Image (tube, helix red, strand yellow):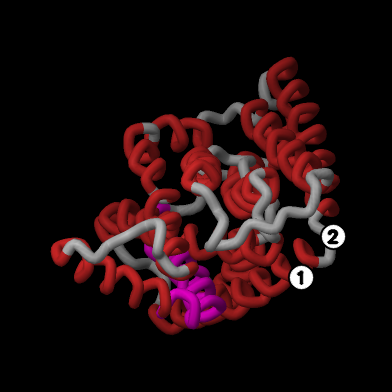
Amino acid sequence: MTIWQAIFQAIVQGITEFLPVSSSGHLVLIQYFTGPGGQGDLLFIVLLHLGTLFSVIVAYWKIIAELLREVVFILIDLPRGKFSISKASAKRRMALLLMLSVLPLVFVIFFRDFFESMATGGNLLPVGISFLITSALLFIADRCPKGHKTAKTMKARDALAVGCMQAIAPMPGISRSGSTIAVGLMMGLDKKYAVAFSFIMSIPALLGASILEIGDAVRYGVNTPVPVMVVGVVVAFIVGLFAIKLVQWLVVSDRFRIFAWYTLALGAVVILVAAVELSTGGILRTIFGG
C-alpha cells in the first residue's frame, strides 16, 4: 500500500465514521464492485478505527474527564451507602445513562456473524433497505419538535432507546451516528447534547470493534509499512475531528436533513442495482471487475 492509498482510505474512514452516511454500507458497495481488500491490511483498518476513536476523545476530552471522575466517585460512594440517583449531579447522571446505553452492545457479540454475512453475502438489497431506514430516521428526527432534555432531565428509557439503535448500527447501511442522534432527537434531547451523547457513547463501540478484530489482524500479518500506517492514523484522526465538528454544526443549524436526502437517493439506487444484479446474474459486478 502506498502512502497516497493510505491517505485516501484514512480520509474516507474519518468522514464516513461520523457523518450519517454509514461507513460500513459504503465499504460494502466499494468491495462489491472492486473486490474485497487483502486481509493483510486488516491491521491498518483497525488502526484507522482507533484513529477516529482518538478524535472523539480529543473533541470531548473535558466532558470525558469529568465523566470518568464521576465513575470513580460512584465506585467509592456505592460501598459507603452514599450513592443516590435522585440527588445525582448532571455529570453523574450522564455517566450512569451512558453506562446504561452501552448495555445493548452485548447482543452485538451474538449477532456478529449475521452482521458479517450482510457485509460479505454479495446481496445488495439489504444494504439498500438499510440506507432507506437511515434516511427515514433522519427525516423523522428533522420534523420532531425541538427538544430540551439534557443530562439532568434525560430518562433511562431515552438512553436505552439510543443504545438499542447503536446495537443495530453494525448492519451495513445503518449509520451509527445518524441513527443514534436521530433517536435522541426523537426522544426530546437537546440538539447539542444529543450529538455529544451519541459520540461519547460510540467510544466503547469503536474500542470493542477494534478489540474483536485485532486478533485476526495480527494473525494475518502486517503488509503495510509502519510509516504509512502512522500517516494513515494521523489523517484519520484529523479528518475524524473535522467530521465531528461538522456534524455538531449541521445538527444545531438544522441542516442535518441533507443526509436524509443523500441516504434516500443512495438507498434507492442500491435497491435498483440489486434488482438488476439478481435478474441478470451479476452483470454489473462482472462489468466493473468485482
Quarter-wise, where is residue 211 in the image?
Answer: bottom left
Residue 249, label in figure: 1
Q: Is residue 41 magenta?
A: yes
The image position of residue 223, as x and y in percent, is 38, 67
Horizontal relation, residue 161 to residue 84: left or right: right
Identify the mark nearer the N-term, 1 or 2.
1
Q: Quadrant of the C terminus?
A: top right
Horizontal relation, residue 172 to residue 116: left or right: right
Horizontal relation, residue 103 to residue 250: left or right: left
Element on which disc 1 rests? helix
Q: Residue at x 50, y 41 (%)?
A: 157
Q: Is residue 212 magenta?
A: no
* Residue 41, visible in the rendered structure: no
Element on which disc 2 rests? loop
* Residue range highlighted in magenta: 39-65
The image position of residue 210, as x and y in percent, is 37, 59
User: Can you name the residue that lies furthest to the left here?
Assistant: 79
- What kind of residue is marked 2? Arg
* Residue 160, visible in the rendered structure: yes
- The residue at which mark 2 appears reads as 255
- C-alpha separation, residue under disc 1 versus residue under disc 2: 8 Å
Q: Residue at x 44, y 57 (%)?
A: 98
The image position of residue 80, as x and y in percent, is 15, 66
Picture layout, residue 227 above or below residue 51: below
